[in-house]
Image: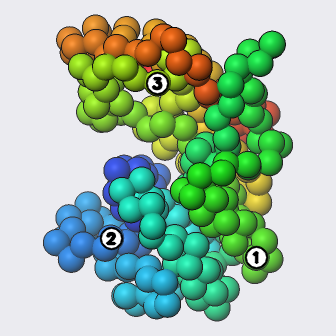
Amino acid sequence: MNKSIAILGCGWLGMPLAKRLLEEGYSVNGSTTSKDKLPILAEAGISPFQIDLKEQSIDGDLKAFLKGIETLIIAFPPKLQKNPDANFVSKMAYFVNELVQTGVKNIIYVSSTSVFEDMQKGPTGFRVITEDTQPDGTSKKARQLIEGENLLKDTTNFNTTILRFGGLIGRGRHPAKYLSGKKELKNAQAPVNLIHLEDCLAIMMLIITKERFGTIFHGVNPIHQSRKEYYQFKAEALDLEKPLFDNEAVSKGKVIYSRRLNTVLGFEFQKEI
């Protein structure tokens, strides 16, 4: 396998992945949208590129970024939470059209389990989602994420692996900190679907080293406590003010299974959430 890899988006996830790849003898081209971050990438041993996707253009030298690259990891956040009116699909459509003109053969696309709709608890519990479940999210964000996945999956010029992670935690990042002290929080009984950064990195390394391209994986820790139970416990463990939940409101949620990680990659979760 060609040991030159490109990572589009060297942020919270992409940067530690790049460092892990470097440790394993890969050469890494990494992108950022910030000029100020270029020397940080270079200092880490990453070949730095400033790349910014637009709806009708790409700022930066995409051809140089992908020269000699067979495997591309797309790990930039679509930022639809902060800007729900952004046209992520147009950016991806233009980007994919440019990608087919390069030598890229394999893609790992970091997506999200939010492509699936949250539903009320049924007679047998909350809805169970597997890698075979068709995405059906109805929010504007979910619809754009689904279309982004499909743009890559439906393009035959390369093999695309869709990697849907749950909520990301680790290295000082934990939603319990954000929820601390909040009141009347909804979905008290909904299951949590989370994953630690270190497990994310291990999964991605297995996909690369075992060359498991062209499939769909879910990355969610198998612990699915209720939001109320989990976040109140974590707040206490982190010495934070406990969040308070609305116990009367109907909870909506889902349980995300990640069975294919074990059956295809032989992966076992190692990090506590």
**Residue 222 locus on image (x, y percent):** 62, 21
What residue is disc 2 on? 32
Instruction: Please tell me which residue is depicted at 24% across the width and 72% down the height of the picture.
Output: 34
The answer to which of marks 3 and 1 sits earlier in the sequence is 1
Q: In this view of the protein, can residue 243 be seen by the observer?
A: yes
Pointer 1 or 2: first along the chain: 2
Q: Report which quarter residue 144 is drawn in.
A: bottom right
* Secondary structure under the numbered disc 2 in the rendered image: strand
Task: Report the residue marked by disc 1.
Answer: 155
From the top left corner, tell me how far across and down residue 267 is, in percent: 65, 32
- Of 228 and 57, the residue lying toward us: 228
Q: Position of residue 207 (x, y in %)?
A: 65, 50
Quadrant where the image shows the C terminus? top left
**Mark earlier in primary sequence (2, 3):** 2
Q: CA distance from mark 3 to mark 1?
A: 39 Å
Residue furthest front as drawn? 248
Mark 1 Cα within 10 Å, few/some/many (few <14, many 20+)? Answer: few
| Of labels 2 and 3, the one closer to you | 3
Q: Amino acid at mark 2?
A: Thr
Q: Which residue is mark 3?
A: 186
Q: Is residue 267 visible?
A: no
